[in-house]
Amino acid sequence: MSKHPILVAGAGGFIGGELVKTLLAQGCSVRAVDKKPQWQWYQRFEQAENLTFNLEEKDSCIEAVNGCDVVYNLAADMGGMGFIELNKGLCMLSVLINTHLLLASRQCGARRYFYASSACVYASHKQKETNNPGLKEEDAYPADPEDGYGWEKLFSERMCRHFREDFGLETRIARFHNVYGPYGTFDGGREKAPAAICRKVIQAKKSGANEIEIWGDGQQTRSFMFIDDCIKGILLLMDSDVVEPINLGSSEMVTINQLVDIVEEIAGVKLERRYNLNAPKGVRGRSSDNTLIRQRLGWEPSVPLREGIAQTYAWIEAQMSLSNSNERVVNRF
Ligand code: NAD
């Protein structure tokens, strides 16, 4: 095991926090960095070196990377469709984080670098039907990604590739497809569909209101990956020789209506559905083709949606009963 700390950028967020937890459990030394004040981190661990830096700035990146030989970049200004459709400029500014982290990694002699990309890099015209056959890695080109957020991800992927080819930094790139689970964002405008639907069903159940608002007509399709699968995939990829961007997502595709069915069944309620056709909807159909990850890593995400949503629902329900007293629960060890 390396004596150097491992840098997790974006450690105060959903995926970064889970990664820190897993690396610490494996006995690694971890430097956790985020721009949010530490009381706002979703999970914060005393065994890690916890630092608050704005990683859009190059000097902060050098301080963060200095002494680390492995860097995980999970820092970005992002959220669900409601956020990325309305904040394209902010999403694109995350290019500064990746650019400065790559430069700092090169300058400080880091060996390996992980970049969290997204299914939003895939060409829009491949996602116009609900019966999406699963996006293959080559479907990212010719480029026609999600405006703003997707262009930033595609450009940053490309920059990772050229830092590997030109400067010998071993970069690894995963294209995450919709990650969900406990400790994810579930309110405030940046939440994604699974957490938003859990929250709305819990609110409807508590208030006795018999209805739920759904964005779009509910027929749009997606696949959702449970956080445990995401962390396992990141670590497998970082240990591998897979240098090209690779899908990290579930291939269990559902309509948004089917997702609502699952949440209602867990909650033990049946609600009237009000479809808001003017809300941000994203692409019509999206799922992950896992041929490449099966071939290259001998593994693919496998936690069934029903099982992952049950855990997520229980966690959000617990948070919401506490948030009545204005407390946000943070995992601190
Ligand atoms: P998150 O918003 O929970 O975490 C991101 C963290 O980055 C936040 O804590 C934020 O404060 C931090 N951050 C933002 N700007 C920063 C800056 N300038 N300096 C330092 N920290 C900064 O998001 P997440 O769900 O954990 O996503 C992690 C990564 O995975 C992101 O790159 C995201 O684009 C990517 N991704 C996530 C999903 C998903 O479904 N969650 C899907 C595709 C890609």
Image (cartoon, rainbow, N blue to C red):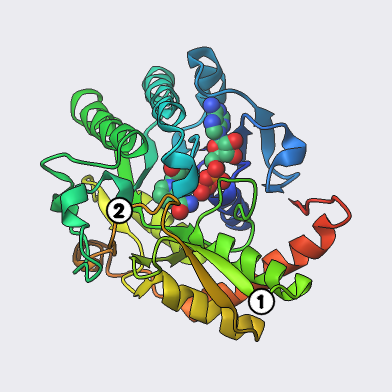
The x, y position of residue 296, in whole percent, is 22, 62
Residue receiving disc 2: 240
Residue at (39, 41) in percent of width and height: 114
> Does any atom of ligand 1 lie closer than 8 Å to the CB of label 1?
no
For residue 118, say whether it is visible.
yes
- SS category of the residue bearing label 1: loop
The x, y position of residue 218, in whole percent, is 40, 69
Residue at (61, 83) in percent of width and height: 266
Camera-nearest residue between 179 and 5: 179
Question: Image height check: is 188 above or below 203?
Answer: above
Q: In which quarter of the image is residue 250?
A: bottom left
The x, y position of residue 185, in whole percent, is 61, 52
Whichever of labels 2 and 1 marks the residue nearer the N terminus, that label is 1
Disc ID at residue 210:
1
Local crowd at mark 1 within 10 Å, few (<14), some, or many (≥20)? few
Residue at (39, 59) in percent of width and height: 233
For residue 303, say whether it is visible.
no
Q: Residue furthest left?
A: 142
Q: Quadrant of residue 248?
A: bottom left
